[in-house]
Amino acid sequence: MSGLGEALQVLVSGAATGSVYALVAIGLVLLYRTTRILNFAHGDVGVLGTFLAYVGFTSLGLPFGIAFALALAAAAAIGALIYLVVVRQAKTTSDLGLIILTLGLALALGGFDALVFGTDNKVVPTLAPDTIARFAGASFSVASLVTASLGVVLMLALWALLTYTRLGVAMRAVAQRADVAEAMGLPVRTVLMATWAAAAVLATAAALLFAPTTLLNPTMMLDPLSKGFVAAVIGGMNSLPGAVLGGYVLGVLELVVGVYVSLEFKASFAFLVVILVLLVRPHGLLGRPDVKRV
Amino acid sequence: MTDEAASEAHREGAPRGAPRAPAAPAPATPSSGSPPPSSATPARPPRRYGRQSLLYRDRYEQDLRLIRGTAGWVGAAVVAAALIALPLVAQGYVVYNVTLFFVYALVAVSLAVLVGMTGQVSLGHAGFLAAGAYAQVALAGMGVPYVLTVAAAVLLAAVLGLLIGVPALRLEGPYLAIATLGFGLAIQQILNNWRFVGASTGTIADRPVVLGVDFYADAAYYWLAAGLTALAVWTVFNLERSHVGRAFRAVRDADLAAQMSGIGLAKHKTLAFVVSAGIAGLAGAIYGPLVGYLTPESFNLLLSVKFLLMTVIGGLGLLPGALLGAGFIAGLEIYLATFRAWSQLVFGLVVILVLVLEPAGLYGRWLKVRRYWKTWPM
């Protein structure tokens, strides 16, 4: 049953990678559908949070779990700060101007990381001991199982936030029609600030889960960020379930291609998929086209 | 894409078809009945009203002119003379960097055609640049004459532009941005694995010899690059004021209305991609022999991002703005190199500051200043 075992193994490690992509993608989609901003600084916010966790773990000697949680809290503050200091002050209202703004932000944050924490590679510990578990002829690393399940927990938490809390309902209302939401008395700016904070937390969680599989440096999130964009676009930029679906589909497909087709082709495969999906469905698998008025 | 910068330009007078000044009245055709008395007056050149004629152009021929008035001709002559004389007075590294600026300016102008005129976004222009550069270098390595290698570089990039432009018809906003981003990364990875062009180690590019003239020296190559750049920029400036340029802008501002007016949406959107990619390919053909060595990793996402920065910071998609932006970003990079570790942080902060303080870009600011002085003291 080695063929089946191998397939199972590919599926689980693909899902672990996919949950990182999905976490990045839902952060991007959460922000995009509320603010219409394609946030290229998303990865760098995550890297900054990860560096904070790393400093807490090594310099301050905190247990990694505590450092992890503190980094998420710090990321929320960073996200809110970005909204208050940069995004709200910008007079640019065009979509392209806002994209460029986040590109500038990404460069500034990356430069800040390189300046403060250095560009050398750092090793980030995993949340769970990196042991091997065996099941049905396949061997998994426990850490990747934890990564996959923690990703699911975070996504469920976001879903609960959006469905059952007043803040979540307000976020959805602002996403739907900001001007009407404001007319109804919703504090739109506070809601937007909360959205930026939530997106930053998601970015940091994704970066913290991704970091142990590679090495921590200021450009660590470049690849997961572009894959997260691909996942979000495959799923549809205004659909959160689509982002999750896109993330897992991309994670598994990529590993299947890497194992069964060719390793060299693996990296560019994602962009082939996105072009194919967009040819068939220009607004992603679960996305809805914007209604256009003449 | 209808931004403040665009509306500035509108007021300053790119032909948008909107009736503003008292244009020559349509030839009255009193075919039947009694025409209204006002329209019976014969067509005559419109009167000029003091300072206003400085601000507004009131005849179509004035709008069509590329260089306007004595001041315009003097300015153009001074710029041309300065550019031609530069290698005679400046040091080698200045000449090299100005040649590099020509490459950046060409790509920024090509993006202005795409982003500024038709409102399509591209985060993959480094891919077109790479295609042009590699095509030129590979063909030159096979002994093909220089002129043909440049033509082939433009052609290959234009064909790639067609390949991206057709699927791009169905995409908009973030979807197009990510699809083009993917294209740029895919080109980079193809080059990274393609042995024929040296894979990840890269390939050597020689300076050309054309008709027995050796362009090995920095100054000689500068003049060659300046000539090619000027030709391309002049063509694009003329394209903007042609009926094709007007169709591009109509597609950008109101695609449905443009379609209603008989403008082929698919044709013009694809054409913009082809033209833009072709110019980027030409920039690549200049870039290869200039730097002397091509590696796939130099055509990364950051380069595409920088090209977009140039176009937007210069003045959202306006052609003079693209030139200004290319100069600004290229100059800023050279200046910031002295900051070492601080350079990237400062670069990002400058980008943010420009967008926060002047959403219309550098050229938008210049237009404001110019209008202030022209209408002074009003």
Image: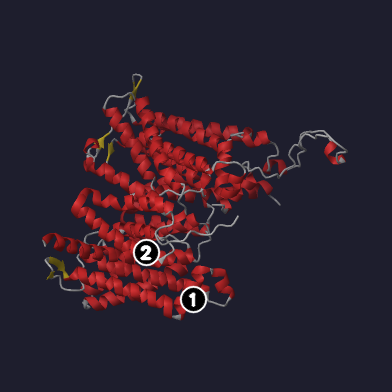
Front disc: 1 or 2: 2
Q: Secondary structure at mark 1?
A: helix
* Quarter where residue B96 is shown: top left
Crowdedness of circle 1 by 10 Å Cα count: few (<14), some, many (20+)?
A: many
Q: Position of residue A283 (x, y in %)?
A: 44, 57
**Callout 1 amino acid:** Ala
User: On screen, B185 above or below A200?
Assistant: above
Q: Position of residue A188 (x, y in %)?
A: 52, 73
Badge number at residue A92: none
Circle nearer the N terminus (1, 2): 1
**Residue placed most toward the observer, B38 or B105:** B38
Residue B214 relative to residue B355: left or right: left
Evaluate whether residue A16 shows in this view.
yes
Residue at mark 1 to residue at mark 2: CA–CA distance: 21 Å
Marks 1 and 2: same chain?
yes
Q: Secondary structure at mark 2?
A: helix
Give me the chain letter of mark 2. Answer: A
Q: Position of residue B44 (x, y in %)?
A: 79, 33
Badge number at residue A170: 1
* Quarter where residue B250 is shown: top right
User: On screen, A287 above or below B145?
Assistant: below
